[in-house]
Amino acid sequence: MRSVATFSRSAGTAGRSLLAPVPAAILGLAVVVFAPGIPLAGGREASVARSPQSVVQEVEAIGITVADLDRSVGFFSRVLDFEKVSDREIAGGDYERLEGVFGLRMRVVRMRLGDEAIELTEYLVPKGRQVPVDSRSNDRWFQHIAIIVSDMDRAYARLRQFGVEHASSGPQRLPDWNPSAGGIRAFYFKDPDGHPLEILEFPEDKGDAKWHRKSDRLFLGIDHTAIVVKDTGSSLRLYRDALGMRVSGESENYGTEQEHLNNVFGARLRITSLRAGAGPGIEFLEYLAPTDGRPAPGDAQANDLASWQTRLVVKDLSIEERPLRAAGGRLVSPGRIGLEGGELGFRAGLQARDPDGHALLLIELPEPRN
């Protein structure tokens, strides 16, 4: 029996062994690709009614809670070539209700790499809890982003130059006998807080066309964020049926390469890829084996270092609450929160957690000016 993870209440460096599984649509062994609209999980159709307005229009950004914002900004800019877009300090009752954290004051920096963005948030007060030191890739608080590179050897050399902590033993090239994954190279490492990150290089015959455009850049953008889930069917009812994201692929991954990339002995994963109209994908990582991954704590908060936040653009938040709850989501905000100042680039938001505790921030963008 595995021990129960303890979330310390003092903020500090995040835990170890937060490794990233292989991307669903590109790295699976025995990959099966599904066309949008084809039902999964035994052919069961959508069980949560939705209207056209409830379709997620875009995965707008991926949020990461950090302990020291200046340190993290330096890491993402110097090591990975992200560019700083904005830097704001936020406080007030509306944001307390949005994030579910009383008395908050937070500093938020938005950074961009190619077409995609991350938002790094340091809670000046109150400080959250650090990631358990024994965290593993199959624990259900796991989340990562996958950064596409133009040259794996050069990218790995850059990481070594800056002394980045390894999560994989080194870059891995997947075997050619797998027609869906052969030639793909991947490597996993950690940011200063221990958040798992992935760099990935596609061969010419794989990956989205945007990753093959001629460029002198080494780090190109974010292909997806991945989350560990307990049950794919339950997660599909929220992301696909309630929020309208489309399934773009599914695979079952196993073997020595998968085990060593994830650093989980005997790993066998069901991986499901979803896409919105724009932005990075979201991937479910369901561990068929081993099944000893631990659930996220029920009292997890946005200021905990293990907390990521996937930001989703919707047209009308007023119709989202009921489908979210019916699909197993748990509201963090008491409802739609209007934000008159729009300091973070959206006019209203609603935060919820999915069935596994991963945070989603649904937002309405400002109306376009005539």
Image (spheres, rainbow, N blue to C red):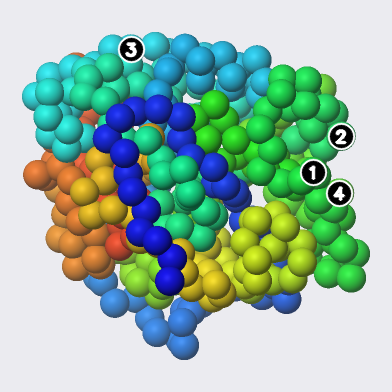
Q: Which mark is residue 88?
A: 3
Q: Residue at x 78, y 20 (%)?
A: 161
Q: Which residue is mark 4?
A: 204
Nearer the observer: mark 3 or 1; the answer is 1
Q: Amino acid at mark 2?
A: Asp
Does 110 sit above or below residue 200? above
User: In the rendering, at what x and y percent does residue 243 appear?
Assistant: 33, 58
Nearer the observer: mark 3 or 2; the answer is 2
User: In the rendering, at what x and y percent does residue 58 appear?
Assistant: 43, 43
Q: Earlier in the sequence, mark 3 or mark 2?
A: 3
Give the left or right position of residue 226, taking residue 55 as reference.
right
Q: Residue at x 65, y 66 (%)?
A: 265
**Residue farthest toward the bottom in the current orientation of the protein:** 42
Total numbered labels: 4
Nearer the observer: mark 4 or 2; the answer is 2
SS category of the residue bearing label 2: helix
The Cα–Cα distance between marks 4 and 2, rounded to whole angstroms, is 16 Å
Q: Which mark is residue 153?
A: 2
Give the left or right position of residue 276, taking residue 305 as reference.
right
Q: Residue at x 48, y 50 (%)?
A: 135
Asked if the residue at tag 2 contacts the one at tag 3, i.e. Cβ–Cβ closer than 8 Å, the answer is no
Q: Which residue is mark 1?
A: 170
Neighbours of disc 1 within 10 Å: few (<14), some (14-19), many (20+) = some
